[in-house]
Amino acid sequence: MSMAFKQYCLRCGEGLILNEEIKKDGKVHYCQMCEQRVRDPNYYSCEVCNGVLHKSCGERPQEMQHPLHSEHTLEIARGYRKKCHGCCEEWTGYLYECSHCNFYLDPKCAFLPLTIKAESHDHHLILLQKSFLFTCDTCGKESKCMSYFCITCSFVVHTQCALIPSTLKVTSHDHPLSLNLKYSHQLNQSENQQICQLCVRKVDTKYKAYYCSSCDFAAHPRCAAEIDIRDETFDLELKDDQPIETHLLGPDESTTTLAKINPRNGKAEIVTEIEHIWHKHHLKLAVELENNEKCDGCARYLSSLQYYCCLQCKFFLHKSCADLPRKKLHPLHKHPLTLQTPPNKPQNLSPYGPEIFRCGACGRSANGLVYSCDDCRFQLDVPCSLIPTKFTHVGHEHPLFLLSTDVGKGKCTSCGQVSRLFIRCADCEFSMDMECATLPLTTKYEHYEQSFRLSYTVEDDSDDLYYCDICEKERDPEHWFYYCKDLQFAAHPKCILGNWPLIKFGRTYIYDVHQHPLTFVERTTDHPKCRACGSKSGYPLIHVCDKCDHFVLDHWCFEGNDQQEMTYI
């Protein structure tokens, strides 16, 4: 008899406890072995590392025999990107392996039922436990692996395609998606082709696909069923005609309106005064534009957009930033995100200290408002959070799609740099990273009063070389740049925006070992050494005293002292 490992945690080896009800902590729990959500009230958990196992997964044997590899015994082991011989997919996690033959089966393939009644087919399916070449009747992909087969109508399907539900929800779309059995007749026929809005590739209408008829949203079955993008909080029994986001996220609490209704006539008016979670004073709607000032929410220049300001201190907030929802779902992350102020502790999010975080999409450091995940360390800055699933950009002629996951490293069309790509065009090979996708359309530079406009084509028809007027280096005319026609001034985006485009400098803090307030600035060669560590070039961000010429603290040292009273003025 094979020995069970139900008494031990797969992660840390400690003992497991059998629970009889799901924890009421509001979190979604995933099984260590199969990586699927734990919904059954009977499950195993570890008190040491908080690991969770389905009851069935926790009671699976440590070793087994399987028809696909009957000559040797398979044993449970941890693997990284091993190809499963059952479904031919890569798997990272616990699996069954033969150490003699490099044969692997993931937990799902190892214990597939011999017969099933799939939601996507009318008849019962039987498991074929031998590998042969076939074309899946659900997704249309050709494979050589285990499959489910219908002896009534010769329907053949991947094992993973046979198990997908008839209805599911992905984090990048508000409504549930249905797996269409007669997909080609339900599509919007005005389109020449349908595009999967998750991978931005053509959908073959001869096969099945997930579809939202109210939004004309289509997705490949395998794309929508990916665990990283599925909304595991979706419950089919709670589905109604309202967007799921409304039920999941609840009321908005980021802004409190102080003036909205005119008591004389009862009509709605422009909100002139608000309270916001990030500032202790009331904010009033501004009338005059503050030149070269940045918003404390998105760290972008105020420009000509409406904004609120604090009359007691130098605090500004775009009206659009003040109206950001308290919680939201975003295609780039499977958990709900909460609008917060920047973290007050480092938490390994950025090498530059607290109140500065690193965006999980564009990789830039920022100190504005942040959408943060309560379950993990994913954080999203405001500009990246505003990119929709499908959008148009003045820099490209075709619609662009935000992928649910990055497609790996590649060359960004708009800047030519090799980076993680999240944006893709369905009509051509255009793709770009989130940094370029969130470039401001206009920006300021140093003492110039004129605005610089983001441009996408050369400013003249000459054959001369093109240069950046800041770094004086040659620039590629096919890449995006900032340009001012009045000044005949062109520059690389990184040159004009600087090293810290999403950092707002000038905030003032009180530090308990110094008698004057300290101002947050970027270090220059003129600044003296850090008073705490003696470094003059180690950290680019510092706090300086405007009254004491030689008092400087590196930002990291400023935050690292436990005795500080870090008060934002």
Image (cartoon, grey):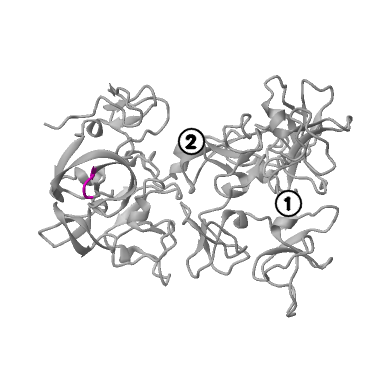
Vertical arrangement, residue 339 with respect to residue 222, above or below: above
For label 2, count other residues whose C-alpha is less than 10 Å away and answer few (under 14), some (14-19) or many (20+): few
State the image coordinates of residue 362 (x, y, percent, origin top left).
Answer: 58, 50
Q: Which sits in the foreground, 110 or 205?
A: 110
Q: What predominant SS class does the magenta segment belong to?
A: loop
**Under tag 1, what secondary structure?**
loop
State the image coordinates of residue 477 (x, y, percent, origin top left).
Answer: 68, 71
For label 1, count other residues whose C-alpha is less than 10 Å away and answer few (under 14), some (14-19) or many (20+): few
Query: Which of disc 1 and disc 2 is earlier in sequence?
Result: 2
Instruction: Check residue 498 in the rendering and tell me which mark sits there, or answer none.
Output: 1
State the image coordinates of residue 100 (x, y, percent, origin top left).
Answer: 21, 47
Residue 219 appears left or right of 401: left
State the image coordinates of residue 367 (x, y, percent, origin top left).
Answer: 67, 39
Q: Which sits in the foreground, 15 or 175?
A: 15
Can residue 316 be seen here? The reply is: no
Please report the bounds of the magenta region as a residue range: 97-101
For the residues labelled 2 and 1, the Cα–Cα distance comes to 30 Å
For the N terminus, the image quarter is top left
Q: Mark 2 points at which residue?
A: 376
Residue 205 appears left or right of 314: left
Q: Nearer the viewer, mark 2 or mark 1?
A: 1
